[in-house]
Image: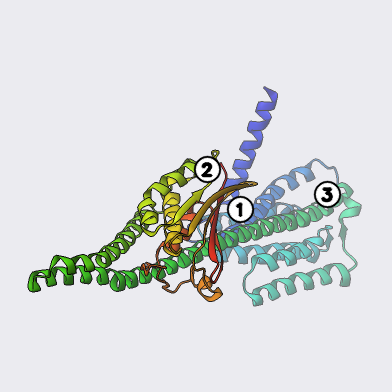
Amino acid sequence: MQVLEQTESKQMSRFSLQRIKTIGYTDEMDSYSKRRLGIFNLINFFGLLTGIFTPLLALSNDGYLPLIAWIVAAAPAFISFVVLYANYHHHYNFAMLWYFILYPLITSLVYIGSIDAGIELFFLLYAVFSVFFLQELKLIVVAIGFSMISYIAVYIVQHHYKFVMAEINYPFFVFMHALSIALIFAGLFLIKKENKEFQQEIITSNEELNKYNLEIEQQKEELSELNNLKTKLFSVISHDIRTPLYGLRNLFKSVHEYDLPAEEIKILIPDVVKDLQYTTDLMENLLQWAKSQMKGEALSPQLIDVNKLITDVQQVVRLQAENKQVYINSKTDKPVYIYADKEMIEVVLRNLISNAIKFTPKQGEVTVNVRESGELVEVFVKDTGTGMSEESRKKLFGDEYFTTKGTANEAGTGLGLMICKEFLKKNGGEIQVQSELGKGSTFAFTLPRA
């Protein structure tokens, strides 16, 4: 129960000091101005308490005190009350002038009244405070100059006083020295504490700003990539879709206008079918890409047996391989699991195997293999096809539109590998290619193992 009461007492004390600190705050103030005003309020609050308790302490001593000493002892209460009242009504400049004129003036009056009260250190306190609280350089110079001149005049130049506090009331003399030193250190501590918190606030703000800048830069890069991709798509659509459609149109037009015999139609149909197959592949890739863009970053990851997925994709490209007499060899003896978006990885596999068939001559072979390597699963698609030069290999995943024809003159979209790279990146994977002209190519991609 006692601990609870102490905790509540501390909370009430902090709440009261916080209310004192926020006197005069406005929403228009910046963080630094609020901190500066908060310290000024706390210092004047302590000055108010000092002006109340110092005369009470003097009453408890038997030593004689002149009238001017009583006035000076009680003056901080009046001066600091006016400062707090002015801040409450947002008269900040008046409060500053009142403080830095009245406090040094009252302190000087003590010594002018021929009393050595032992409070000369307060002049140093006023000088230190003026540097922090006053904003204009000329006001700072005037305040420091006034305090230093007063200090030199009353403590260094003048040595003989009618009343010496150390002789007539030594406990009060010691108390005033201790109070002046305590106020100096308390003021410096508050200033240092608030400055440290303000610097930390600036650091935090800068970190958040840097974070936002990085996000903006990332969004800018993503937007740039999207614009480049859009340009590629328009290039592919405008250039490559028209060709097979024009071929089909011309075939039907010739049949309609010239009544072509069946033998000639049979000769033309294989080329049209080849073009339509190309168009089908292109549309499939375009639809998959559009679907991924509509989904955005929202993947649908699931546990996938890579070997089973390879078997499923083989069935999809089986007719393409049989028509070209290309043998697909895959080793799918045991399950190997990954955690990824199944549709995306299926598109990647279909594109890579289909490309391998495309660039492999008749009686060639395409090998699909899976290997576990630490925390990754590696999938290899190797062909015995034409291979490619170093220059062509560098263009595969570049920003420029790039496509080549297969060994049977099959057209390519230039879009499939770009989609493979994007889909793998979204699933935390990478793709690489090794190739040598005339010796085939090996495409390999990695994904995190489940």
Numbered marks: total:
3
Image position of 162 with respect to 391: above or below: above
Classify mark 3: helix, strand or loop. helix
Q: What residue lies at 37% left-to-right and 49% top-to-bottom?
A: 316
Viewer-closest of 402 and 171: 402
Q: What is the CA distance from the residue labelled 2 to the residue labelled 1?
A: 87 Å
Would you say the residues marked 3 and 2 are in contact, meaning their CB atoms lie under 8 Å apart? Answer: no
| Residue 301 image offset from top left, x and y in percent | 46, 44
Q: Which mark is residue 277?
A: none
Rendered position, 189 above or below 17: below
Give 340 or 145, whichever is nearer the viewer.
340
Check disc 2: other Cα within 10 Å, few if <14, some if 14-19, many if 20+: some
Can you identify the residue that label 3 sits on?
A: 175
Q: What residue would you read off at disc 2?
A: 332
Q: For the residues marked 3 and 2, what is the alpha-carbon distance in whole angstroms?
A: 91 Å
Q: Residue at coordinates 85% horizontally, 52% vertically from top-left?
A: 173
What's the amino acid at mark 1?
Phe
Query: Would residue 204 be visible to someone looking at this image?
Result: yes
Secondary structure under badge 1? Answer: helix
Q: Amino acid at mark 3?
A: Phe
**Left or right placement of residue 226 versus residue 249 in this view:** right
Quadrant location of the N terminus? top right
Q: The disc labelled 2 sits on which kind of residue?
A: Thr
Asked if residue 59 lies left or right of residue 226, the reply is: right
Q: Residues within 10 Å of mark 3 (few under 14, many from 20)?
A: some
Pointer 1: what residue?
A: 81
Q: Quadrant of residue 100?
A: bottom right
Q: Name above or below for residue 275 compared with residue 380.
A: below
Q: Mark 1 and mark 2 in contact (Cβ < 8 Å)?
A: no
Decide which of tag 3 and tag 2 comes sooner along the chain.
Answer: 3
